[in-house]
């Protein structure tokens, strides 16, 4: 295996070189910061670092976030403000009229007479002083009655323009403080020369957000292991902003389709709906995901065309690809061929299964060297979704073939060889037995003989396994899943490296094979992520279509990912694509749940049960007709009914606390607008965000 985690040999099967990599297109304007961006299109690195990122609840986009009060302040109705302002204005005019016309006496002009000399009487100076005093008195009345009538609040409400569009892409920077772009952490450690080099690079605009985070992470590794100090210092001195590069040599993605804040490792998905059912503190705030919540795994359910791929899967994959370039994550994106999860240049490895032009192959055994481990992974993928099929028995049957074959030939069988052994073709079995006999492997001979004896018995899973392997033994897959060392297979054992991998499945012509491979990849990811010796990298698997992928075994593996610094994203069109007995456990196993617009009431019921209930305050208003006893009162009521057409009633208001579902099945099915989704989050630290309606188009 080379440094990138790809098995490579000097004897490669000749394959077409494939299409040339896509040209690197410039990042979309408004993303921050980029080394080649003009100063007028975005903030500098120093400004970007000084933007406030206050502590906030899980899921809040912290870049430039302004915290709000937990409770909504009481808002006086505009009609009440208008009436109060009119009454205070009339009262002020009346008081001024009474003062001006002398109905209240002349006490209010005593200060004028006391503070002006008698010689001014009848002069122009006295007239000017009088008008000044009148202005002071009038101004005092205006201020007093204005405060009493709340004129400023009414004026602000009347002249305030309704907000349009979204918040600015770049919030105002924080107050002047420590210049992080000057690399004070390096200066404090005595690396003044390295800090000066990086500061000059930043001042010249040659450092972007990926560079800053990548070098900062490299410095953290130096602090953990002082033996890396000299190589780090030499890399900065020689390469400047290009120090400690990702193995691919890339410093950014060719294009970004979402907004990212690599300092917080967040990707912005949209804006929380400002409606009444949203908590006041979250209304209008940005909604973001980061590894702290993705580590609990995410389930997204929504019909085709609701934006699961473009508004959720791709932004998440893109964010983790950027973090991979910064040395923080390893991401594997699995989708049907043709699904747009990013250009080829945005990935280190692109596996196109069934495409002869594919440069990379897929390791069917996930890098496993133990036959029993490989058998368990294959059994989970081959028969894990078949009702009534015992996966352990299937794994035993596979192990009885994989173990002897690996012992005899030093490798695992290819797909055609495995199919021949499962079908118990005599030439293949005899050749394997002869090789084992020549090597004196009696233990493995007993394993092979046990498989031969069990073949054809009523409980034998061999024929089912052979049928499943036959799905991969097709002309379209010729040359793939090679185990002879003649290709470049990608295996999940590479998760310890900061890799960006995309695997394209042949969904169009080989749907059953694609689903089986998706199950295999999920099982391999669960095993490889948990077996990593170094878990400092966040490992993530994104399945754009997880239909018929989950089994009881893989679901148990997903539950264990939280403690392995790893997570998965499972996108489904409906929960009906999951076995019925696994639907409730699935919603309980993942920490992040997303219900897109258009889900059915059946799916909505499952989400409603998972999100539970909350206590809310309700107001019940009862209208009661007033019956008068006095003749005059009855006459007044009759006249009022004649004018308004309604009987005279009185209102009785009852306020009580009731327990209701946060989102009902009917609300999820009918009240979620297009382009929106209801999301709830859990973090690996136990923090939670209640389900919120999020506009994914802003």
Image: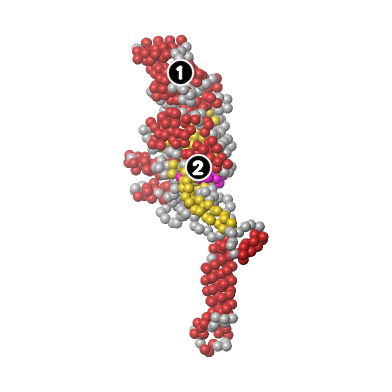
Outermost residue, bottom direction? 119
Q: Nearer the viewer, residue 429 or 693?
A: 693
Marks 2 and 1 in Cβ contact (< 8 Å): no
Q: Is residue 158 magenta?
A: no
Horizontally, residue 86 falls left or right of residue 192, namely right
Is 211 located above or below residue 247 in the figure? below
Q: Position of residue 651 (x, y in %)?
A: 55, 57
Q: Position of residue 409 (x, y in %)?
A: 41, 17
- For the N terminus, the image quarter is top left
Which residue is labeled 1 in the image? 461
- The boundaries of the magenta stretch are 689-698
Mark before the other along the chain sequence, 2 or 1 = 1
Q: Where is residue 570 in the image (x, y as percent from the top left)?
A: 49, 34
Rendering quarter of residue 413: top left
Q: Residues within 10 Å of mark 1 (few under 14, many from 20)?
A: many
Which residue is labeled 2 in the image? 679
């Amino acid at each position: 295996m080379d440094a990138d985690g790809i098995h490579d040999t000097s004897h490669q099967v000749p394959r077409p070189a494939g299409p040339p990599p896509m040209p690197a297109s410039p990042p979309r304007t408004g993303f921050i910061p980029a080394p080649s961006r003009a100063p007028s299109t975005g903030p500098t690195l120093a400004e970007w670092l000084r933007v406030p990122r206050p502590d906030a609840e899980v899921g809040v986009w912290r870049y430039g976030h302004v915290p709000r009060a937990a409770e909504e302040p009481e808002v006086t109705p505009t009609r009440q403000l208008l009436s109060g302002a009119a009454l205070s204005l009339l009262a002020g005019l009346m008081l001024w009229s009474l003062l001006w016309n002398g109905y209240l006496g002349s006490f209010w002009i005593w200060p004028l007479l006391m503070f002006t000399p008698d010689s001014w009487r009848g002069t122009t100076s006295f007239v000017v002083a009088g008008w000044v005093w009148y202005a002071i008195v009038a101004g005092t009345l205006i201020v007093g009655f204005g405060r009493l009538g709340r004129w400023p609040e009414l004026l602000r409400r009347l002249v305030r323009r309704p907000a349009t569009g979204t918040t600015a892409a770049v919030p105002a920077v924080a107050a002047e403080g420590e210049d992080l772009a000057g690399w004070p952490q390096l200066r404090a450690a005595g690396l003044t020369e390295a800090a000066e080099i990086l500061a000059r690079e930043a001042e010249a605009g040659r450092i972007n957000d990926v560079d800053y985070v990548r070098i900062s992470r490299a410095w953290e590794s130096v602090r953990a292991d002082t033996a890396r100090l000299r190589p780090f210092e030499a890399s900065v001195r020689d390469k400047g902003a290009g120090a400690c590069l990702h193995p691919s040599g890339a410093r950014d993605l060719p294009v970004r389709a979402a907004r990212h804040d690599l300092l917080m490792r967040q990707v912005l998905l949209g804006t929380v709906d400002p409606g009444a059912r949203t908590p006041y503190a979250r209304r209008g705030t940005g909604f973001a995901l980061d590894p702290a919540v993705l580590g609990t795994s995410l389930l997204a359910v929504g019909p085709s065309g609701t934006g699961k791929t473009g508004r959720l899967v791709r932004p998440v994959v893109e964010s983790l690809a950027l973090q991979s370039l910064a040395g923080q994550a390893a991401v594997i994106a699995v989708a049907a061929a043709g699904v747009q999860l990013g250009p080829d240049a945005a990935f280190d490895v692109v596996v196109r299964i069934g495409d002869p032009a594919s440069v990379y192959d897929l390791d069917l055994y996930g890098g496993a060297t133990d036959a029993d481990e490989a058998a368990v992974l294959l059994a989970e993928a081959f028969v894990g979704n078949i009702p009534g099929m015992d996966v352990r028995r299937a794994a035993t049957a596979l192990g009885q073939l994989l173990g002897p074959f690996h012992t005899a030939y030093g490798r695992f069988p290819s797909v055609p060889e495995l199919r021949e052994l499962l079908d118990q073709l005599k030439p293949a079995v005899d050749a394997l037995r002869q090789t084992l006999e020549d090597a004196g492997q009696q233990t493995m001979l007993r394993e092979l003989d046990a498989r031969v004896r069990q073949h054809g018995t009523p409980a034998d899973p061999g024929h089912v396994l052979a049928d499943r392997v036959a799905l991969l033994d097709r002309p379209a897959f010729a040359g793939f899943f090679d185990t002879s060392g003649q290709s470049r297979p990608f295996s999940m054992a590479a998760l310890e490296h900061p890799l960006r991998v995309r695997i394209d499945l042949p969904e169009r012509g080989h749907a059953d094979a694609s689903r089986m491979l998706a199950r295999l990849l999920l099982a391999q990811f669960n095993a490889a992520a948990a077996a990593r010796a170094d878990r400092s990298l966040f490992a993530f698997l994104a399945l754009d279509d997880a239909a018929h992928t989950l089994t009881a075994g893989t679901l148990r593996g997903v539950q264990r990912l939280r403690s392995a610094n790893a997570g998965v994203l499972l996108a489904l069109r409906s929960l009906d694509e999951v076995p019925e007995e696994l639907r409730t456990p699935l919603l309980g196993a993942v920490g992040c749940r997303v219900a897109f617009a258009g889900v059915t009431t059946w799916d909505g019921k499952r989400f409603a049960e998972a999100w539970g209930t909350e206590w809310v305050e309700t107001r019940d208003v009862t209208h009661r007709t007033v019956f008068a006893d006095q003749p005059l009162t009855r006459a007044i009521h009759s006249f009022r009914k004649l004018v308004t057409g309604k009987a005279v009633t009185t209102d009785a208001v009852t306020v009580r606390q009731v327990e209701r579902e946060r989102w009902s099945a009917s609300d999820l099915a009918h009240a979620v607008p297009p382009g929106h989704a209801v999301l709830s989050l859990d973090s690996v630290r136990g923090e939670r965000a209640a389900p919120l309606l999020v506009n994914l188009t802003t």
